[in-house]
Image (cartoon, rainbow, N blue to C red):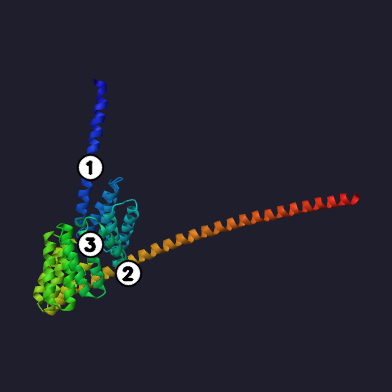
């Protein structure tokens, strides 16, 4: 009987292993979901989660792709578009091994986002068109509502930045319609972003009431999922409307709330806008000490942003320089290789010519000998 124990233990071990794989996958899926919720408020943690999931996903292609896209989104939230592009390109290369159309749609959309963020609008539209074509041809419409919504949203951003807010608003509304079929935390975050941008468009067109309504709705969706960054942005937008209406104390009150909410977010651009709003409103009510305090913070934050952008450009130039050095090095190697090949072929040609001349001389000598023999006869 004891001889069977090792076999029994082996069977039990195999059974446990068969259970651990689905359990591990479930845990990784839960991590990805948790990381997705931290993209805006804690992107560094989202990046850590994405890298952890990627490292532990073994040969699960879908999980690897989702983890790479999570990392890309988190870097985008940090406004590190160079790193974001790096990871989405890795995802695109890896997706070549997949026949999952939904994944391909997501990656095409994310590449479009990268081009939009770099203001290369024609390339962004090109990838949006590819993504849209796949999404609209997908057999299950319910599976692509969020992707079609994202497609409309990015088009809205492009038109907004090109100062055509009327068209932008229509795209944002179409995005919200598609998002309306889904009720998840990420979708609520996206709707909050759409409402915020619609509010900004209404400010441009001078419709303060419509802007106010959009910002209040944006705040409601951000609060629903406790998205601090989105909440602070929407509050900043609402305060801007109050400033335009001359309601300075109310604007200050909302901006102070936004500053409190954004404390743990660490978004320099958000803080820059809040400091700017507070300094302007304190100036309007003649509170000079507070004006100087927040104007100084506004200037310091602006300088930090500029230095960060300069560093990013410098890093990009360094990377470009390294790439060029590699290309030059490879070109030199290729050039030397071609010279060696040419030299070798030249030697072969010369040797062939010499051999041909030698054979010709030998033939000529033989002919002369035969002629001499014939003459003797």
Disc ID at residue 122: 2
Residue 171 appears in the picture as rendered: yes
Comparing labels 3 and 1, the label whose residue is closer to the camera: 3
Q: Are marks 3 and 1 in contact (CB under 8 Å)?
A: no
Q: Residue at x 65, y 56 (%)?
A: 349
Q: Residue at label 3?
A: 148
Callout 1: 10 Å neighbours few (<14), some, many (20+)? few
Residue situated furthest right in the rendering: 376
Q: Nearer the viewer, residue 162 or 250?
A: 162
Q: In the visual, does 369 lie left or right of 63? A: right
Q: Nearer the viewer, residue 230 or 25?
A: 25
Callout 2: 10 Å neighbours few (<14), some, many (20+)? few
Q: Position of residue 271 (x, y in %)?
A: 19, 68
The number of numbered badges drawn on the structure is: 3
Callout 3: 10 Å neighbours few (<14), some, many (20+)? many
Q: In the visual, does 342 lie left or right of 204? A: right
């Amino acid at each position: 009987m004891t001889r069977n124990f090792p076999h029994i233990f082996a069977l039990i071990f195999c059974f446990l292993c068969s259970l651990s794989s689905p359990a591990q996958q479930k845990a990784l899926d839960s991590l990805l979901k948790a990381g997705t919720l931290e993209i805006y408020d804690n992107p560094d943690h989202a990046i850590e989660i994405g890298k952890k999931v990627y490292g532990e996903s073994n040969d699960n292609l879908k999980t690897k792709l989702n983890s790479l896209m999570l990392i890309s989104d988190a870097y985008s939230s940090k406004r590190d578009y160079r790193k974001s592009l790096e990871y989405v390109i890795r995802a695109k290369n890896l997706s070549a091994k997949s026949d999952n159309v939904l994944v391909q749609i997501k990656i095409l959309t994310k590449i479009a986002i990268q081009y939009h963020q770099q203001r290369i609008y024609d390339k962004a539209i090109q990838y949006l068109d590819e993504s849209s074509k796949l999404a609209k041809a997908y057999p299950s419409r319910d599976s692509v509502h969020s992707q079609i919504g994202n497609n409309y949203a990015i088009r809205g951003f492009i038109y907004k930045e090109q100062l055509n807010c009327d068209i932008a608003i229509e795209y944002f509304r179409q995005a919200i319609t598609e998002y309306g079929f889904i009720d998840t935390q990420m979708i609520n975050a996206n709707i909050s972003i759409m409402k915020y941008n619609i509010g900004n468009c209404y400010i441009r067109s001078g419709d303060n009431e419509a802007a106010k309504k959009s910002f209040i709705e944006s705040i409601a969706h951000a609060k629903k999922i406790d998205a601090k960054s989105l909440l602070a942005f929407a509050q900043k937008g609402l305060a801007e409307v109050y400033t335009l209406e001359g309601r300075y104390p109310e604007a200050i009150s909302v901006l102070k709330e936004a500053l409190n909410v954004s404390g743990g977010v660490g978004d320099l651009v958000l803080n820059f806008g809040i400091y700017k709003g507070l300094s302007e409103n304190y100036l309007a009510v003649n509170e000079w000490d507070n004006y100087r305090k927040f104007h100084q913070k506004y200037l310091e934050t602006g300088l930090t942003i500029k230095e960060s952008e300069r560093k990013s450009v410098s890093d990009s130039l360094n990377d470009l320089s390294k790439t060029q050095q590699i290309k030059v090095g490879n070109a030199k190697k290729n050039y030397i290789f071609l010279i060696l090949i040419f030299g070798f072929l030249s030697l072969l040609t010369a040797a062939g010519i010499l051999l041909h001349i030698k054979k010709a001389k030998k033939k000529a000598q033989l002919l002369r000998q035969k002629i001499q023999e014939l003459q003797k006869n």
